[in-house]
Amino acid sequence: MSGLPLPVIDSDNAEFWAACKRHELVLQRCGQCKTLRHPPRPMCHVCNSMTSEWVKSNGRGRIYSYVITVQPIHPGLVGKVPLATVRVQLEEGVLFTSNVVGCAPDEIRIDMPVEVVFEDVTQEITLPKFRPSRQVEG
Ligand SMILES: [Zn+2]
């Protein structure tokens, strides 16, 4: 248990969280204009279509931005700071908010390649997080 508030599953995001439970990262895609979006929501921000489908992400991206929390500003953060919260730009183009694991917060750099990993937190919630990518850049 993370001690932090957990995501609330609703009809818009249920498939996203079910996929995380299977350790798969999926993205919502507009059924009309095919624009990818995240977080899941009922309507396309480009064409206003209410139809959507789910596509699997390869889980790879780069650090777009980050912030490091050093003060435990929430009781759930006691003993967990410094904590890096990152915006990852997935290879599919979508920005994704998460945390980085597997490296110290001061090792995080803009444009650093990362890949998704999954942290099973409760019976229902598995959180997608990111670690430095093991892939050779080229
Ligand atoms: Zn659309």
Image (spheres, rainbow, N blue to C red):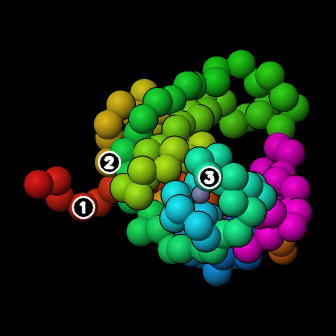
Front residue of 79/11: it is: 11
Left or right of 73? Residue 80 is: left
Binning the other alpha carbons within 10 Å of mark 3 as few (below 14), some (14 to 19) or many (20 upward) gives few
Query: Please, what secondary structure does the residue beneath circle 2 have?
Result: strand
The answer to whether the residue bearing label 3 lies less than 8 angstroms from the nearest atom of ligand 1 is yes
Which comes before the other along the chain, label 2 or label 1? 2
What's the residue at 73%, 55% (across, down)?
43
- Residue 117: in sight, yes or no? no
Q: Give the residue number, with chain letter if any, for mark 1.
A: 135
Indicate the secondary structure of the residue bearing disc 1: loop
Is residue 15 or residue 73 the one in the foreground?
15
User: Which of the two discs, 3 and 2, sits closer to the camera?
Assistant: 3
Task: Name which quarter of the figure residue 4 lies in.
Answer: top right
Residue range of the region highlighted in magenta in the rendering: 1-15
Q: Is residue 29 above or below residue 137?
A: below
Q: Which mark is on residue 1?
A: none
Category of crowding for the residue at label 2, using alpha-carbon neighbours closer than 10 angstroms: few (below 14), some (14–19), many (at least 20) = many
Q: Which residue is mark 2?
A: 113
Mark 3 lies on residue? 47
Neighbourhood count class around disc 1 (C-alpha, 10 Å): few under 14, some 14–19, many 20 upward? few
Q: Position of residue 38 (x, y in %)?
A: 62, 52
Vertical placement of 35 versus 3: above or below? Answer: below
Give ligand 1's quarter of the image.
bottom right
Residue at image point 50% right, 29% down: 66
Q: Amino acid at mark 2?
A: Pro
As drawn, 75 above or below 5: above
